[in-house]
Image (tube, helix red, strand yellow):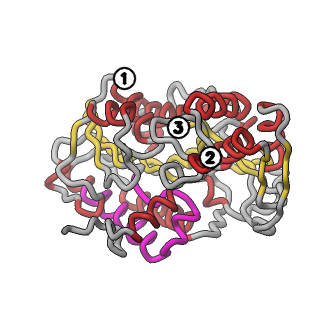
Amino acid sequence: MRVLLTGHLGYVGPMVSQALMMAGHDVTGLDSGFFFEPDGQCLAAADRVGRFPVSDVRDVTAESLKGIEAIVHLAGLSNDPMGELDPALTLAINQTATLDLARCARAAGVERFVFASSCSLYGAAGDTALMIDEEAPLHPVSAYAVSKAECERELAALASLDFAPVFLRFATAFGVSPRMRFDLVLNNLVAWARTTGEIRVLSDGSPWRPLVHVSDMAHAILCVLNTPADIVRARAFNIGRDDNNLTVARIAEIVAAQIPGSRIVITGETGGDPRSYRVSFARARRDLVGFAPRWTVADGAAEIDRWIVDQGLALNDVMSPRFVRLAQLKQHLACGRLDSALRPVRI
């Protein structure tokens, strides 16, 4: 299958491109390069995929999509803090550009549109004793989550016998990737524990979060492409493992067990967090061909810890713009490499 992968140079993208190519798919990448560092491992992965004629998803046309059979759409402002950088920009990139891409795809005869959605659209879910499935009401509490919810609704309206959009509601990502991040909860807590001896929890630790390893995210995308269109068309699937539903405090305890001598510090400086939800992943296990997520949070903590040690990183490294997406964007803006619309400044 000829697949266009947007966001192929991000945190998730290299894992997805590798999984797709190993399965025999012909992969073309489209990425703005905001967070691309030309280190050897990522550069090698990027060089193995084809290059799309444009690098910004906002510039795609129907004509440029001719011959593409499926789109895996990862590109966008990738978490709640980045979404709050400029809510109007979040709307333009995460929602308007996504829907424009989908309309172009449908006009070009693309058969499948895999949209990277998020469990964050469950937001303030209320009773966390209940496991939320895909039919639960949505309660997004951030610009990022609102954009995901609106995209799902409008993409579903584009579905037809010849065009199958599908929505993968990913849990919070963790794990080692060629384009590593430390602005994700497990990655961040392990980084602080290993480099300072403290596991800093900024909330009160009580919110529930579902988590998923970046490799299992890539696995889920491959499973969607292998599943008949009639099963996935205009449907949402939560992606993760049931036993990876944990409170932030419990995640911190798992990190402490991985790094003996580290101590948990509940600062509470961000106050109460309204985002709290436990998620059921039964639909994906039942309906997506071959879906069987492998990674536990404990396994991920060990993997991340080994990577930090192997790389010889200190706190100023893991908290630098290289590994923190919002800091990287702000640096690009401050240096004049990007304009206020997050487009490259031509000199």
Q: Is residue 284 visible?
A: no
Q: Amino acid at mark 1?
A: Ala
Q: Earlier in the sequence, mark 2 or mark 1?
A: 1
Residue at screen point 61% across, 32% down? 285
Q: Residue at x 62, y 43 (%)?
A: 314
Residue drawn at 32 percent across, 73 percent down: 339
- Position of 273 with respect to 31 (left or right) is right
- Which residue type carries mark 3? Met
Closer to the N terminus: mark 3 or mark 2? 2
Q: Are marks 3 and 2 in contact (CB under 8 Å)?
A: no
Residue 232: x percent and y percent? 46, 42
Q: Which residue is mark 2?
A: 171
The reply to whether callout 2 and callout 1 are in contact (CB within 8 Å) is no
Residue 217's disc number: 3
Mark 2 is surrounded, within 10 Å at the Cα level, by few (under 14), some (14 to 19) or many (20 or more) other residues, namely many
Residue at left 75%, top 58%?
276
Give amino acid for label 2.
Ala
Please give left or right for residue 138 compared with residue 71 in the image. right
Question: What secondary structure is the stretch in magenta mostly built from?
Answer: helix
**C-alpha gap between disc 2 and disc 1:** 24 Å
Span highlighted in magenta in the image = 75-104
Of the residues under marks 3 and 1, which one precedes in the sequence?
1
Q: Which residue is mark 1?
A: 23
Q: Nearer the viewer, residue 65 or 248?
A: 248
The quadrant of the picture occupied by the N terminus is top left
Question: Can you give x and y, in whole percent of width and height, for residue 50 in the image?
Answer: 22, 37
Q: Secondary structure at mark 2?
A: loop
- Left or right relative to 209: residue 1: left
Q: 109 or 95, which lies in front?
A: 95
Decide whether residue 306 is among the magenta residues. no
